[in-house]
Image (cartoon, rainbow, N blue to C red):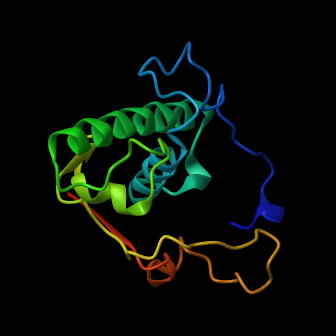
Amino acid sequence: MEISDSSIIVRASWHKGNDLIFTSGFAGIQCCAMALANILRDSILSPQYWSTNMLNLNMITGDQIYSNIRFQTERNLAAYSIENDPYLLVRNFKVIKDDLVTFGKRFRITFDEESSIYGSLNDKLNEVKPWKHPSSRFGRSVHGT
């Protein structure tokens, strides 16, 4: 489904900085983990079937993933530190990549070490539809069981 084909746009009931909803103490800085939660959900159910409640749950799950990554990083001295910059980098996912349980499934995530993934929503070069072509998912794969 292309953006122009949509008759509705699903949005969450709040933003990531809402500290009344995200009581972990990390409201506003867990965007990368929330993106991961949405990627994981996409591996279960295509976004065209998402609802506001599902997007809300994805955000809450992303906040929980962020908290888990911080906890695992503090316990693992070899993990890439988060202390100087609270925003996650792709390499911070190493502490959860082999054993991530969420949405009632166990995931193993693989990713490219290159964290410079960028682009433009208006870029005509981005014609590949990732939900139709899993190989186009920026060098990462998600496996759920």
Q: Residue furthest front?
A: 84
Residue 145 vertical position relative to residue 124 in the rendered view, above or below: above
> How many callouts does the rendering have?
0
In the picture, measured across the screen, residue 83 lies left or right of residue 117, that is left
Q: Tell me what residue is drawn at x 60 percent, y 32 percent.
A: 16
Name the quarter where the C terminus is drawn: bottom left
Residue 140 vertical position relative to residue 18 in the rendered view, above or below: below
Q: Tell me what residue is drawn at x 36 percent, y 33 percent.
A: 64
Residue 4 vertical position relative to residue 135 in the rendered view, above or below: above
Q: Position of residue 71 (x, y in %)?
A: 25, 35
Foreground residue among 116 and 16: 116
Q: Tell me what residue is drawn at x 18 percent, y 59 percent.
A: 98
Q: Position of residue 12 (x, y in %)?
A: 64, 33
Q: Tell me what residue is drawn at x 59 percent, y 38 percent.
A: 51
Location of residue 66 (image quadrant): top left
Q: Does residue 103 appear anywhere in the picture?
A: no
In the picture, measured across the screen, residue 85 lies left or right of residue 140, that is right
Foreground residue among 95 and 4: 95
Q: Position of residue 1 (x, y in %)?
A: 68, 66
Q: Does residue 142 appear anywhere in the picture?
A: yes
Residue 86 vertical position relative to residue 57 in the rendered view, above or below: below
